[in-house]
Amino acid sequence: MADMRAGFIALLFLLWLIGGDDGPRTEQLQKILHQLQDEAGVFKNRTFGTNVSYPLPEAVSTELTKLFYPEDKDPRARYYHNVTGSFKGEWMFDEGVASKVNQEFPLPSAPPGEEDPAKNETVPDGGGNSTITTPLPGQDAEGTDSSENGEAEGQKPVDTIEDKRPQYLEDVDKFRGDFQFNKSGSFSFNLQETKATEYVNWIKGTWRLRHDDNEDYGVALSVQGVHFVHNGSFYMWGIPGETRIPAWRILDLMPNKESFTMASAALKEQYQKRIKSVEDLMEGRGDLEYSETTVSETSSCHYQMYMQLGTIDRSIRSSAINDLEREWAAPQGISTIKAPPLNSTLFIYSPNCRLTIGVKKADGMKREKLYSKAVNYAGMAGTLAFIQVFLLVRQMEYTPTPSSVSKVSYWTIAIQVFIDSYLCMLHLSTGVIVEFLFIPFVAASFFSFVLVAIFGMRYMLVIWRIQRPERRGRRNQAAAAAAAAAAAAAAANAAANNASNNGAESTTGAATTRSADTMPGGLPLPVTAARPPTSDDADNPRSDMQALYGRFYWMLILSMITLYWIATSSTRVQNVMISICAIGLFSFWIPQIVRNVTRGSKRGLNLWFVLGMSVTRLALPVYFYACPENLMGHETTPWIWGLVLWVALQVGVLFLQDWLGPRFFVPKKYLPPIYDYHPVLPATDEENGHTGHGPHAPQHDCAICLLPIDTAPQTGAARLSSVVGSLGRLNYMMTPCGHLFHTECLERWMRIKLECPHCRAYLPFV
């Protein structure tokens, strides 16, 4: 009752911590609401062609004309209306356009926190809600026209780029940060579209730039913008994740009054939705949406991002495209055409960093296609887990007795259970985080959970309990060796201390020592084996289960912490650590090979279990790193075939151990000793003094069948013949504790229990 009360109190405390105080949350929501209302007020006063914070240089305008209005553009071209999904491709720094921009464009703003001479004020930091802007020639700091009264007030015009070139270069370097933009690399763009008006969709997403050498985190950007569905053009702002700009800044990117008007209508709808959602949160309805936190290199560059979708083949009817997109948006099970390929071209310009980046072609994948791939992957993962369950059950049936189970390596099974545990948690967490992948990934995690919790852990527990006497025997041997060494050291010290004693005292001490090793009358003590000490957990299943599960889950938690550290590291560290973990986890047959060598056993694992587990466990790595159309979009790598060869090598060694012997590849001088159950018996019975032959030959009875054991072929001349002696020794087996049994009787006994029938001492398997 006390434990239940303590657990209930702890639960209430946890709920109180989770609930927290609503005061700070309400203040935060009020602040956000006032900010949105202020932005909406500013947005209503915007007009096309005025109050523009970032006018486009002529070189950038030329590139945008090539992007949106190429010479071969078809005015009747059709585009996807909703491209929620992801784009991936290669980016390249356009040095020619950047040099033209530097020649014609005025100074950028000063770095965050430093004084801007052109404005004679401190520019606020890029974090929070501040925005870095640059006044144009003929405008004051508020963006209003000052050309009419500038000379009357005696204001100095804005300096040109040539006047401030040294400071300009220093400022740009500070804005760019550590990322090397003068190189090329890869990028990924994940976006989500929501319909704002009939002609415009609202865009939000994340963008990440990386280098070709994959040795950095890359630059992560938060993206927002608009998509004009009639011509497939995108106008977006990309800013570092820790900064924010008002949504109405999208209007600065509009090329003409028509697009400005349509974007304004979309922004009005967007502001109304945001304000309504915040008001609902303040009234206790809805959930607060948190921005995604990503690891990124330091950079304060703001990016104007322009993207043009690729056209759809004109041979495909518009009605077919509309049916396809309606089926994707609201599945009804109707038959549709195969989805046309999705691609885009991008041009990116940073006004405060003077960067121009081009993307010639980026391949895209819509979320619906990703969902279809996820369903197929989940089906494949579930099928593989089901096959593994069948193989594991067959292996458990292959080892029904303790003797057969003792041949199986505990760590071989444990490593495979670890792999299944990771897959179960990975699939489950992915399904929880990515909402539209919940059903397929949770189904895949269920099969992995069945494999781990019902079969894998059960088999591990069986192996753990059966091999416990073996582990206890090793501990006892180590303790005995330590005790013997300590006794020898004590005896040596005593001998050194008594070296000065007289001869009589030495003789008396020798007689006393001799009497301690003999019985009254001078007879030696009988040769018997001491019973093994009884441990507290000798036959306690609950203790075994607690020990096994405790160690397993602690190691699993530590491994998950390590994996989280790897996931938040740079790409180079990720690649190295993933390679190390892959080699370690896919060495699951190595412990079995080592056990076969050290114990001299073979055929501990079923043939189909070895082959099936090897193939099914390699299926997922091969899918992700050898299939170009994999779910995660990983690039193919030839190193995955090295992992396949590594597992195949382990399987080959296991098969050769079953065929040529478990120690065929180890030199004899390095082989660990194996106990011989068929030793040559001594000619004299030390217990009764009779010889091993003649009319008074000792009679040994088997404690299992209670019949006499024939050891006569070892006597006389037959004992000198190795062939006859070996055949004779096959009739009996002597345990390490010195007890004699029929070979057939003890082998049948050891199939059930690896303990001596006499003294319950642990027996090494044959």
Image (cartoon, grey):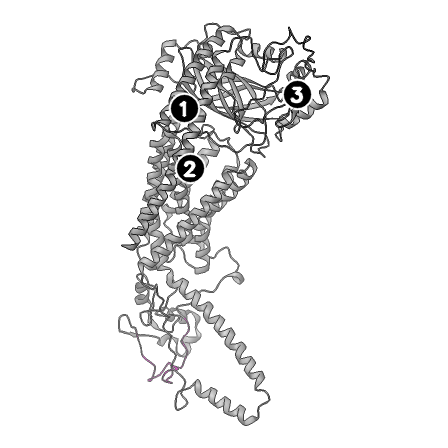
Q: Quadrant of the C terminus?
A: bottom left
Whether residue 661 appears in this view of the structure is no
Judge left or right: residue 596 versus residue 501: left
Q: Position of residue 482 (x, y in %)?
A: 49, 71
Q: Position of residue 453 (x, y in %)?
A: 33, 46
Return the residue at label 3.
120
Which segment did they paint magenta? Answer: 679-701
Of 24 and 495, which appears nearest the observer? Answer: 24
Q: Amino acid at mark 1?
A: Arg
Return the residue at label 2.
619
Of 19 and 334, which appears nearest the observer? Answer: 19
- Residue 367's tag is 1
Q: Tell me which label, 1 or 3, sits earlier in the chain.
A: 3
Q: Quadrant of the N terminus?
A: bottom left
Within the image, what quadrant is residue 358 found in? Answer: top right
Q: Amino acid at mark 3?
A: Asn
Does residue 496 show up magenta in the picture?
no
Question: What is the spatial separation of the Cα atoms under label 1 and label 3, in whole angstroms?
Answer: 49 Å
By secondary structure, the bulk of the magenta-drawn segment is best described as loop
Whether residue 151 appears in this view of the structure is yes
